[in-house]
Image (cartoon, rainbow, N blue to C red):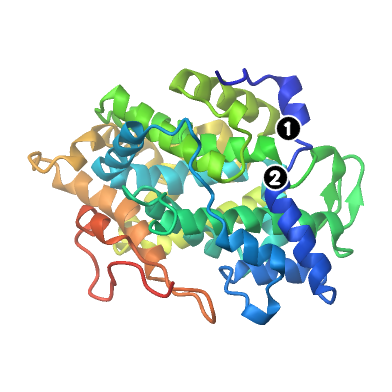
Amino acid sequence: MATIVTNALLDEMSFQGDPLADGVIAEHAAWSRTLVPRDVVRHVAAHLRIAPGDRSPAVETYLADDLPLPDWADPVLLGRGAAFFADHPLEIGSALFCASLPEGYASPRGARVLTLTGRLVDGPVRRVMETAQMVLDAMVVDGLTPGIGAGYEDIQRIRLMHAAVRYFIQNDPSVPHTPHLPTAARGWCDGWGLPINQEDLLGGLLTFTVSVFEVLDKLGVEYDPDDLEGYLHRWCVIGAMMGVRPDVLPMNRAAAEQAAELIRFRQQDASRDARQLTRALVGALEDTVPIAALRKLVPAMVRFYTGDEVADLLGVEHTAWTALLEGPLRRLSVLAHVDNRHDRVVRRVMRSIGGSAVRGFMEANRSGDRPSFAIPTELVPKLQPSPRRFRAGRTGW
């Protein structure tokens, strides 16, 4: 049975990291000797494509060892979770981009992590692309299988990246530390706890589940509650593989909503970092919408999905679309069903915001050792029509 998440428990979790991954990064940094902490982040950001001669024994062992699925992982629920995503990819895609990520930015300490590391690893837009890739890969039926699933590889890399970021912020002299707020624009407040701590890891998982569920309900999407629980279960398995404490993973929607509400109450606040990150995200999303007249739907959807309070914290603008969306968006539940052809305008809106965002980000390529982004082959039909330049399947691994 999962531990009930309380304020006292979250206070404790905010000073807890991930011992396994943190140990690997500490050993790697000690072995390399010449690397300053910021270089550790840069090395890991290169998709673990560290040259063999530059890999420490700790990293070699980490890459060779499998991150096993937890013994409580249920194959039936994992399958239902993958099917749930495949049934609603456009709705979930728009929810992830326009609700989950912005809500994550509404945490000042989470936003500070992103702005600090953005200077080292090409900025927040690339982080958005990597997040989208991980979600797509992890939601494929075999995506979490070691040695087979690309989602497994993504999780392995992101877990180590989190540890590298913790090491950088805690040890690099370019990041000044203060015991209490306020802190320097490029500094860290030790009162926040560790960067990407256990509370933050759990909170991130909840934005990718609870926030998505709230959007689906706002849109009037019809679904089998058991399928939704399967989707939550799949994310809890991902969370365990990502280093989240197993005892705090919510095993049902009610527990997830309770924990999400408490973390929101504790963490959400306005910050300059949050506004900068949100501007970058909204601008990147607008760029993926092929119809210029629909681009201002992006901030309107962020405001509708997250609510006025969070949208105000993030500095999301009001647009002419904001008032209009209250009615049309509630009819988006018909979009996933091919036999509903009566609302083609709304269908195009969803594809522009959800499908175009996914396809647009996946078309971006990374330079050097970083592999190109791609949509797993079995999800391509769900995101049609796709651009001619689009490549199906995984490449560059």
| Label 1 CA crowd tier, 10 Å (few <14, some 14–19, many 20+) | many
User: Is 238 on the left-hand or right-hand side of 161?
Assistant: left
Q: Residue at x 61, y 38 (%)?
A: 244
Percent x, y of residue 193: 80, 40
Q: Quadrant of residue 221?
A: top left
**Is residue 165 at all visible to an observer of this figure?**
no
Q: Quadrant of residue 253?
A: top left
Relative depth, front residue between 318 and 381: 381
On residue 328, which mark appears? Answer: none
Above or below, 204 against 48 in this view is above
Percent x, y of residue 12: 77, 29
Relative depth, front residue between 395 and 310: 395
Above or below, 355 against 35 in this view is above
Q: Residue at x 42, y 37 (%)?
A: 234
Percent x, y of residue 206: 53, 34
- The answer to whether mark 1 and mark 2 are in CB contact below 8 A is no
Q: Earlier in the sequence, mark 1 or mark 2?
A: 1
Under circle 1, the secondary element is helix
What kind of residue is marked 2?
A: Asp
Q: Residue at x 26, y 25 (%)?
A: 224
The residue indicated by pointer 1 is 13
User: Is 297 on the left-hand or right-hand side of 367?
Assistant: left
**Is residue 321 at all visible to an observer of this figure?**
yes
| Label 2 CA crowd tier, 10 Å (few <14, some 14–19, many 20+) | many
Q: Where's the N terminus, which quadrant?
A: top right
Tally the numbered discs.
Answer: 2
On residue 18, which mark appears? Answer: 2
What kind of residue is marked 1?
A: Met
